[in-house]
Amino acid sequence: MFQKVITVDDLDTINIAVIRALEELAIPEIQNAKYCDEALLKIKRGIAEQLPFDLLITDLSFKLDHRQEKLQSGEDLIQAVKKIQPNIKILVFSIEDKTHRIRNLIKKEGVNGYVLKGRNSIPELKKGIQYIYDNDTVFLSPELTHALLDRSLLEIELYDIELLKLLAKGYTHEEVSIQFKETGTIPFGASSIEKRINKLKIFFKANNNVHLIAIAKDLGLV
């Protein structure tokens, strides 16, 4: 079993419940943090002392308060940790259930498990921790298996996501074209962008650009 685990959540009740679950799994060293910056410092200290953490358990959303934080989300923390300790195991424990966001964390960020917070989530969390320790494959809460089984969103490319993000910011087709040209994103022609937007509207069954952006937001694409 894991020997050294850090859990990151801004709610005391969640931290206490997760720590209790880790204790029941007989994990000898458990640390917790309420802020992502604080968690990163503890992970860096572990590396410096040659006593690195085996597992990071983190939420995705953290409420802003009086403290100035460089890392403002669990995704920021995951990316920062992966840069300094690529082999650490990571389990996300969150209420977020949007398909694209979950798939992105697994495929792009290399997350090892994702447990959805809910009424019966602590037993599921314990099961996920044990599974991640025993296996090289990703653990998902049963209600999230569609995140990997639903392959329809695999047709959406990074280009499409960047395009949707710019449209959500109010960019016109011409402004998107200029932005893509400046960043070297291909294709950047106005006609190509218009064709891509029409393709996305057909794919998502959107009536217009506003409807398209609303759907994209619901799916967590932007």
Image: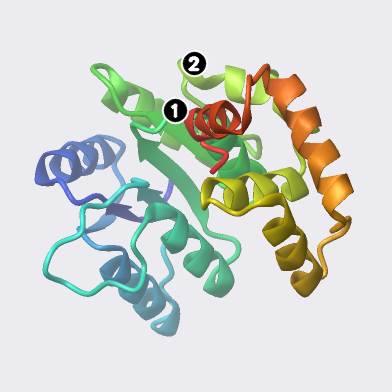
Q: CA distance from mark 2 to mark 1?
A: 12 Å
Q: Which of 88 and 197 lies nearest the eye of the viewer?
A: 197
Residue wearing tag 2: 142
Q: Secondary structure at mark 1?
A: loop
**Above or below: residue 125 compared with residue 23:** above
CB atoms at circles 2 and 1 under 8 Å apart? no
Q: Is residue 115 left or right of residue 104?
A: left
Q: Position of residue 163 (x, y in %)?
A: 69, 49
Which residue does the numbered mark 1 point to in the structure image? 97
| Residue displayed at 67% across by 44% down | 107
Sequence order check: which comes first, mark 2 or mark 1? 1
Residue 163 drawn above or below residue 94: below
Provide residue 132's location: percent of width, then percent of height. Answer: 53, 38
Q: Nearer the viewer, mark 2 or mark 1?
A: 1
Residue at x-position 27% and y-position 41%: 22
* Amino acid at dot 1: Asp
Badge 1: how crowded within 10 Å, few (<14), some, or many (20+)?
some
The crowd level at tag 2 (other Cα within 10 Å; few <14, some 14-19, many 20+) is few
> How many marks are shown on the rendered structure?
2
Applied colour scheme: rainbow
In the picture, residue 115 is in which quadrant? top left
SS for dot 2: helix
Q: Residue at x 19, y 51 (%)?
A: 10
Q: Amino acid at mark 2?
A: Pro
Q: Residue furthest bottom?
A: 48
Q: Image check: 38 left or right of 155?
A: left
Q: Is residue 167 left or right of residue 41?
A: right
Relative height, residue 184 to residue 2 (above, below) = below
